[in-house]
Image (cartoon, rainbow, N blue to C red):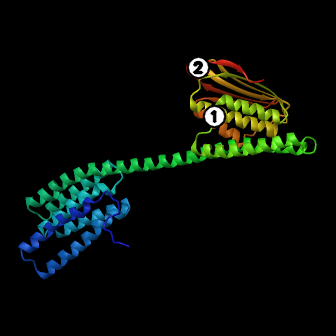
Amino acid sequence: MRFRLIPENSEYTWALYSVSYFGFFFIDPVVNHASARLWFYTLLATAVFLYLYFSIFWVSCRQGLLRVAAMVALGAVFAKYNGGATTFFIFAAACGPFVVDTEVDGVKVLLVVELAAALTWWAFHLNNWFLLFGNGLAFVIGASNIHFAERNRNSKRLLKAQDEIEHLAKVAERERIARDLHDVLGHTLSVIILKSELAGKLMDRDTQRAGTEIREVEQISRQALSEVRDAIRGYRSHGLLAELAKAKATLETAGLSVKCEAATLALPALQESVLSMAVREAVTNVVRHAQARNCSVRLEQQNGSCRLAIEDDGRGGIQNEGSGLRGMRERVEMLGGTLTRDSQAGTTITINLPLKQVAPKPEDLSN
């Protein structure tokens, strides 16, 4: 594992070359021919500083503030013996904005560093060069880094928001696939069961009709495989009128008397797809649970809206929504529509979707 001074893919790459400015801390000992003891403390302070400096980018805000405070303390300790100790205050002012969470906190940290530098200058009666670099240069660098630190925080928030959006999109897609597979397979398997039962009953009485039903079961199974693939890709519907015709055939196969009236509406693709899935789910529920004898399906334009009503004379009385009906309601409401269910006498499901400039053309599918 490769050793790293800053986090990988970090926005702190500037820290690697900025540390070279700490070299000013060595000018005073070199020029004044410092003693071995002073050199020892100088090198010790350098090692401590390097640890504080690079560890800032790996720790929490609270620990980062402690490291900035330690830099200020080193500057105060060495200010009397080394004019280059102003570098500690400069680096503290530069790092301070990056260890807090807000721009305001960055300003507060900078002001504290400035106050510490000014008090150090006053307490040790240092020359004005210390004030110029320890306060003036530190303020300029710290103030500019407040801007850059805030920009980095905004970038992180943006990346986090993008990650969340991507995650939510994936979750929504998984939920869509789950709803669509439920609707597709629930409907198709119900038809397969009905036709298989009918073929079994006809086996002894009418083998030719039974063979026809079995062949239709094969065709429906192949169609189901295609619909599952389409559902995963997000393209399922072959048209609302085709779905209504298929629903009528399914209900009749189940032994119901069906009345289906539909107006040809200029529906957007998404609305047509949602209504097609709603028809499929509602018809599946009628076949599976309603124990009905009659069923009517009506599609019409009403008061600037598309209205789909599916009514049966079955047992009704079921109040709890299953996953299929719940998914149907979610899809309808996403398009700004409404779904109501009345189960007092049989079951009536009514869907209203807002439309714009539709031109209905009546068409009776009963025959």
Q: Of marks 1 and 2, which one's residue comes earlier in the chain?
A: 1
Viewer can see residue 79: no
- Determine the residue positioned at 83% across, 43% down: 211
- Quadrant of the image for the N terminus? bottom left
Image coords of residue 283 (percent x, y):
75, 35
Question: In the image, is 354 to the left or to the right of 124?
Answer: right
Quarter occupied by residue 15:
bottom left
Residue under the point 26% across and 72% down: 48
Which residue is at the front of the view, 139 or 164? Answer: 164
Return the x and y of residue 179 as percentages of the image width and height. Answer: 65, 43
Residue 228, picture quadrant? top right
Quadrant of the drawing holding the C terminus: top right
| Residue 74 in the image, given as x and y percentages of width and height | 22, 68
Q: For mark 2, what is the residue?
A: 358
Q: Is residue 43 above or below residue 276?
A: below
CA separation, marks 1 and 2? Answer: 20 Å
Q: Which mark is residue 75?
A: none
The amino acid pointed to by label 1 is: His
Picture mark count: 2
Residue 73, given in percent of the width and then of the height, sits at 24, 66
Pick the front one: 245 or 3: 245
| Side of 277 relative to 12 (left or right) | right
What secondary structure is found at the residue carrying circle 1? loop
What's the amino acid at mark 2? Val
> Label 1 crowding class (10 Å Cα cut-off): few <14, some 14-19, many 20+?
few
Q: Who is closer to the viewer here, 169 or 103?
A: 169
The residue at the point 16 percent across, 66 percent down is 85
Side of 271 relative to 111 (left or right): right
- 314 on left or right of 272: right
What residue did someone put label 1 on?
238
